[in-house]
Image: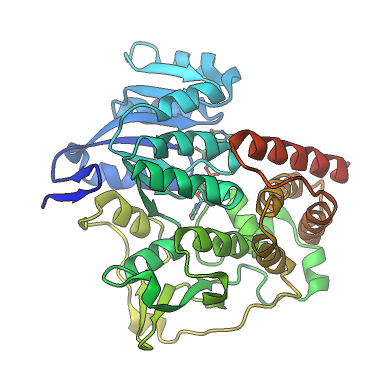
């Protein structure tokens, strides 16, 4: 099958691949899929932050051209682990951006946090395919990122399971025919906890998601439901139907990953086992489909699907995200930056679970910079919000 999408040619030929965040949960699942049919892919770039040993192991296994470690202090360890392999290496944030200029056909953006923003923007500017897992960049710099996507003609393929579900449900439809986009949410491990019970939860409890296996930051975000708030903002940028047409529905079984209701009242949902390999496979094989090892969906075993309205009082992060995108300007970037710092502090036992949203609310309220107009403005706001957050934690 040969399909032309702007300047993107998608055929059965070998795809060259870059994976930013190759050592993480999404990066590892992407490489698991590549292992299923390695002859179809040429891995050019793999990156990590500090896990030099895993990065080197993966780079050698997949015969990558280049391995980049974002935290340059780990470059000697990477070089040692790559010795004799012939694989090039580099270290530091600038090296990450340079690696994003390498002209691979398909880039997985799976760095966690706003640290992924500059490499993703660079990859987007090349106008090829970018599979987007990194929601924080889009939350923080949605307008900039979407403008770059439209300018370059890049195909941005959502990998977040909900947005990937919407993308699939929208195939054959168009945004002006949409009445409602429903993002489903598992509700996380504390769906039934009272606010008092939530005050005492530990990092170990928060990262134990009932349905999904994910990195620590997104697991904590799922527990506070900030993840769903970030996804609400992400959906607004990816599928601009108007905020009033995007809703959140708690669905504890995580079987329906999201739905689109059209103007004729037809609702199309995407279902599957809660396994990130499924949405990643959809992006990796796009516009085709590929065989995966994922478990089949057995509705007889699941037997029932439940739904609840989200609780904005017990999960104030949802309200904060709604308010931030409604207010616009710098608010989403500030919310995202403070949340990243707060989640890090919670994981290190320096901040209570319910204090994550409290800190976000305080700094989004107190800090009122001018609307960012370019990347430099945005990075300055992100940095200032982080230092206010660190000061607030003490
Ligand atoms: P992980 O924490 O498992 O992995 C993060 C990856 O990013 C690792 O490769 C890590 O390297 C690298 N990294 C971390 N910090 C930096 C930095 N400062 N600079 C450069 N690289 C860095 O995260 P996940 O895979 O869970 O999530 C990745 C992204 O995908 C997040 O934005 C998340 O919200 C999104 N996502 C994740 C899903 C999931 O199921 N996990 C589902 C949907 C979206 P190292 O290993 O060296 O630390």
Residue furthest left in the image: 1
Q: How is the image coloured?
A: rainbow
Rendered position, 342 above or below 358: above
Task: Determine whether, in the image, residue 383 is placed left or right of residue 287.
Answer: right
**x and y, in percent, of residue 141 in the image:** 57, 46
Rendered position, 194 above or below 327: below
**x and y, in percent, of residue 57 in the image:** 39, 28
- State how many labels appear: 0
**x and y, in percent, of residue 179 in the image:** 44, 80
Task: Determine whether, in the image, residue 279 is placed left or right of residue 363.
Answer: left
| Residue sitting nearer the eye, 269 or 63 | 269
Query: Residue at (60%, 18%) from the top-left corner?
Result: 73
Query: Residue at (70%, 61%) from the top-left corner?
Result: 327
Query: Residue at (39%, 73%) from the top-left corner?
Result: 176
Instruction: Report whether residue 207 is seen.
Output: no
Q: Quadrant of residue 172?
A: bottom left
Residue furthest top in the image: 84
Q: Quadrant of residue 46?
A: top left
| Residue sitting nearer the eye, 199 or 92 | 92
Quadrant of the drawing holding the C terminus = top right
Query: Residue at (61%, 68%) from the top-left corner?
Result: 188
Task: Determine whether, in the image, residue 143 is placed left or right of residue 371.
Answer: left
Task: Determine whether, in the image, residue 319 is placed left or right of residue 127.
Answer: right
| Residue sitting nearer the eye, 374 or 31 | 374
| Residue sitting nearer the eye, 267 or 43 | 267
**x and y, in percent, of residue 104 in the image:** 30, 33
Instruction: Report whether residue 44 is seen.
Output: yes
């Amino acid at each position: 099958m040969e399909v032309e999408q702007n300047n993107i040619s998608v055929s059965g030929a070998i795809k060259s691949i870059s994976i930013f965040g190759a050592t993480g949960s999404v990066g590892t699942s992407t490489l698991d899929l590549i292992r299923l049919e390695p002859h179809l892919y040429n891995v050019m770039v793999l990156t990590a932050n500090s896990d030099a040993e895993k990065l080197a192991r993966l780079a050698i296994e997949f015969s990558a051209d280049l391995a980049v470690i974002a935290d340059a202090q780990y470059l000697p360890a990477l070089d040692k682990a790559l010795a004799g392999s012939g694989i090039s290496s580099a270290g530091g944030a600038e090296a990450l951006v340079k690696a994003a200029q390498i002209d691979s056909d398909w880039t997985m953006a799976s760095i966690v946090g706003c640290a992924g923003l500059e490499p993703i923007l660079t990859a987007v500017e090349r106008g090829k395919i970018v599979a987007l897992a990194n929601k924080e960049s889009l939350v923080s710099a949605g307008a900039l990122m979407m403008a770059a996507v439209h300018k370059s003609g890049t195909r941005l393929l959502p990998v977040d399971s909900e947005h990937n579900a919407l993308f699939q449900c929208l195939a054959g439809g168009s945004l002006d025919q949409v009445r409602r986009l429903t993002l489903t949410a598992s509700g996380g491990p504390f769906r039934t906890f009272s606010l008092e019970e939530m005050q005492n939860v530990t990092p170990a409890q928060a990262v134990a998601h009932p349905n999904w296996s994910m990195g620590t930051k997104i697991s904590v975000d799922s527990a506070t439901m900030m993840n769903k708030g970030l996804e609400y903002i992400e959906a607004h940028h990816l599928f601009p139907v108007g905020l009033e047409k995007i809703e959140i529905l708690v669905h504890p079984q995580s079987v329906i990953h999201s739905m689109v209701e059209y103007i004729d009242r037809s609702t199309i949902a995407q279902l599957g086992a809660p396994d990130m390999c499924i949405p990643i496979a959809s992006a990796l094989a796009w516009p085709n489909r590929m065989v995966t090892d994922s478990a089949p969906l057995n509705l007889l075993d699941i037997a029932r699907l439940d739904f609840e309205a989200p609780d904005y009082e017990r999960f104030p992060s949802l309200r904060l995200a709604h308010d931030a995108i409604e207010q616009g300007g710098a608010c989403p970037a500030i919310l995202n930056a403070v949340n990243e710092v707060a989640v890090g502090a919670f994981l290190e036992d320096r901040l209570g679970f319910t204090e994550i949203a409290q800190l976000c609310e305080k700094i989004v309220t107190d800090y009122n910079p001018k609307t960012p107009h370019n990347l430099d403005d945005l990075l300055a706001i992100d940095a200032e919000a982080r230092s206010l957050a660190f000061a607030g934690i003490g």
